[in-house]
Image: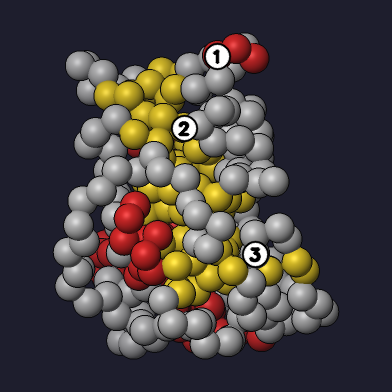
Amino acid sequence: MTYRSDRVLRRTVNSVDCSVTDAADARDGFVERFKSLYPDGNLSEMSRKVGIGATTLAGYASGSLPRLDKLVQIARALEVHVEWLATGEGPRGIQPEVALPPVGTDRERSEQAVVDARAHAVPSAGMRLLPKLTVEPSAGSGLIPAGEAIDGYVAISDEYLREIGVDPRYAHVLRVSGRSMAPTINDKDVVIIDTSVRNAVTEGVYTLVYGEAVLIKRIRLLRDGGVTLVSDNKSEGYLDETVPRSELATLSIVGRVKGHIRAL
């Protein structure tokens, strides 16, 4: 997990990436929070609950940091917030979900949807700070390692989150690299991901981990139980890829893309 220690505010067109603690403190903080999830010291029982080997979990307890998909897997299984587990920010436990009105997901954001924000600042009324992950999901070749880190926060309007139907507690943002999903999602766009969506039960655009890559693809369900990872940008030669049912174990859903912020 990579953190900045220079505390320099790096401005972008639509957001400000916010400084965080240095890497050593961040690593120690994660280890402390991780160990608090099994106070009895029983890693075998924890392994059974989360579906990750005890040896791997022991590595996390010793300071090795998990990949994005593993972090999400642990948080979901033990019913804690991903943001809390990764950064120590926000509430630890997950409360029952709040029902949100179903709305369409294709509407573009207004210019007021995103504003600059500092890491520990209290957002203005009507705004919500969402954690921004440093990993760049590929909408191209997919040759991007599945590492992860909270790299500051982006302030998003509550109104926009309601419009796209995302509970703020499960909302994360990621910057896209690649053009395979253009014009739906373009290179350098920022996507808003609903991490409460764990399975692809309907066709849609998802963030997923496939092999050792983090991808943004449209998932199309097949009758035989497999899926097709669809690239929207056929005009530039991007091809679809079929994942047979027998290989679905190598594919993990991080969340469903519910909205995106255009790069200017």
Three-letter residue code for mark 2: Lys
What whole-number distance in Å separates the C-alpha atoms at marks 3 and 1? 31 Å
| Distance (Cα) linking label 2 and label 3 | 24 Å
- The spot of residue 165 in percent (x, y) is 29, 55
Residue 159 screen position, x and y as percent: 37, 65
Which residue corresponds to the image point at 44% horizontal and 82% vertical from the top-left? Answer: 125
Circle 1 residue = 234
Badge 2 element = strand
- Bin the neighbour count of mark 2 within 10 Å (Cα to Cα): few under 14, some 14-19, many 20 and up: many
Residue with the mark numbered 2: 217
**Residue 64's x, y, as percent?**
59, 68
Colouring convention used in this rendered image of the protein: secondary structure
* Residue 43 visible in the picture: no
Q: Which residue is mark 3?
A: 15
Query: Which disc is residue 132 wearing?
Result: none
First in residue order: circle 3 vs circle 1: 3
Quadrant of the image occupied by residue 249: top left
Label 3 element class: loop
In the image, taking residue 195 as reference, residue 208 lies left or right, namely right
* Nearer mark to the viewer, of 3 and 1: 3
